[in-house]
Image (cartoon, helix red, strand yellow):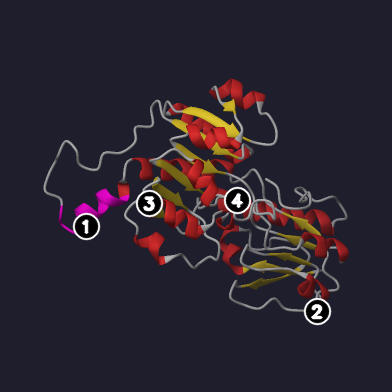
Amino acid sequence: MAHILIAAELRNLLDPDPVPGHGVEWIAASEVTPTGDITAVVPLLSRRFGEAEFAQLPTLAIVANCAVGYDNIDVEAARRHGVIVTNTPDVLTASTADLTMLLILAVARRLKEGLALIADGTWTGWHPQQLLGLELDGATLGIVGAGHIGQAVGRRAEGFGMRIRYSDRSARPEFERATGARRAPLEELLAASDVVTVHVPSSPDTRGMVNGKWFARMRDGALFVNTARGDVVDQPALLEALERGTLAGAGLDVFPREPDVHPALVAHPRVVTLPHLGSATTATRRAMANLAVRNVRAVLAGKPPVTLVPGPPTE
């Protein structure tokens, strides 16, 4: 009988006996990963696995990450120790795309400032120039990373009348036909877009890619949204662009060192910050948990996993 660790936070999303015939131990995110005779782990993004952890788990066969990203796992170290790594792609595409559109709308229409007027009692009534924002109909959305989520955002934005440009290593002809999207080099996209949204994984190539040079290339008064990974953004550069007025606003669902969020971002009237809610719907979180467990069941049965990660994190 295999010894399986599953994040306790997933318990209400799974069947009472998620891996029949095997012993399951529920472990909270705040608890240290046990060592010894463990066959499988279903962790959250907050639990890290590197060389030291794999060395202490000699019987470990699979880490089934309950997330689409897997930057919490040293995949090369896992391979050296013969450990399979899986993730949960595709099942969170719709919910993350929905939240991205929510942030685009919230920042474009200055929602945070409007809520503050009501909350602090300073609203004096309707005014023709009060909190004028960006109209999405006819505006240009630049999508950096047109994988599943990026394309889903584009389809939603097209419904709001936005013109779509995207930057990606590969052309997406079906996406172009469906939305009228046009592929463009990154510099051209940044200069032409009223809103830029990022949908790339965390990797050595993408960490800090959204930096001062990036913001300098954006048109004055543009908006920036990130629901991908926090560490792709250079936060001091983001704050500087906001303070200079080069960037008119930002919507952020992810941060470099969660749950820590830079106080200046939280306080800024034109920055909407959310606590990593991209996949936070009941249906999506249940689908993620069940896909992670399906990967464990497959490996324990001697079958290939359903969603094996390909190597260095990619969407």
Residue 270 placement, left or right of 130: right
Q: Nearer the viewer, mark 3 or mark 2?
A: 3
Q: Which mark is residue 119?
A: 1
* Residue type indicated by callout 4: Met
C-alpha distance separating marks 1 and 2: 53 Å
Count of labels in the image: 4
* Residue type indicated by callout 1: Ala
* Residue type indicated by callout 2: Gly
Residue 6: in magenta span: no
Q: Earlier in the sequence, mark 4 or mark 3?
A: 4
Residue 117: in magenta span: yes
Q: Earlier in the sequence, mark 4 or mark 2?
A: 2
Residue for badge 4:
209
The answer to whether one can see residue 257 in this image is yes
Q: Earlier in the sequence, mark 1 or mark 4?
A: 1
Badge 3 vs badge 2, beta-carbon distance below 8 Å: no
- Where residue 44 appears, as percent x and y from the top left, is 63, 63
C-alpha distance separating marks 1 and 3: 27 Å
Q: Residues within 10 Å of mark 3 (few under 14, many from 20)?
A: few
Badge 1 vs badge 4, beta-carbon distance below 8 Å: no
Q: Earlier in the sequence, mark 3 or mark 2?
A: 2
Residue for badge 2:
36
